[in-house]
Image (cartoon, helix red, strand yellow):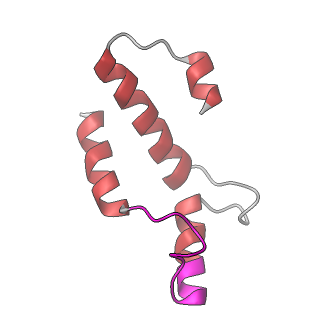
């Protein structure tokens, strides 16, 4: 998140909400990370859920579908 905050200028309050939401979606769903085996955090969560049956205690819960819907609305 620091990289976003150091590089972006927010023109409006809506812009200050939209840009971090888009960055967070990209960070969690698009960009692979080296620590979870070059997977995105979302892929690593799904793999852990399949392996353990549920990752609710291991990872913070998020409503991924609702988050994606809200992020899509922000990018329009």
Q: How many marks?
A: 0
Q: Is residue 10 left or right of residue 58?
A: left
Residue lying furthest front in this view? Answer: 57
Span shown in magenta? 48-62
Identify the image quadrant of the N terminus. top right
Image location of residue 43, percent across then percent down: 55, 67
Was residue 70 drawn as part of the magenta stretch in this picture? no
Q: Going 59% across and 59% down the picture, which residue do you hit?
A: 40
Q: Going 35% across and 62% down the picture, which residue do you hit?
A: 63
Image location of residue 16, percent across then percent down: 39, 22
State whether residue 74 is above or below residue 30: above
Closer to us: 44 or 14: 14
Q: Is residue 55 left or right of residue 16?
A: right
Q: Going 29% across and 22% down the picture, which residue do you hit?
A: 14
Image location of residue 61, percent across then percent down: 46, 65
Closer to us: 50 or 54: 54
Identify the image quadrant of the C terminus. top left
């Amino acid at each position: 998140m620091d990289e976003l905050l150091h590089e972006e200028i927010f023109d409006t309050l809506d812009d200050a909400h939209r840009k971090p939401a888009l960055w967070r979606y990209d960070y969690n769903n698009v960009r692979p990370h080296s620590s979870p085996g070059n997977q995105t955090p979302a892929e690593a969560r799904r793999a852990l859920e399949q392996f353990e049956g549920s990752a609710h205690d291991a990872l913070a819960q998020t409503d991924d579908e609702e988050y994606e819907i809200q992020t899509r609305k922000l990018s329009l």
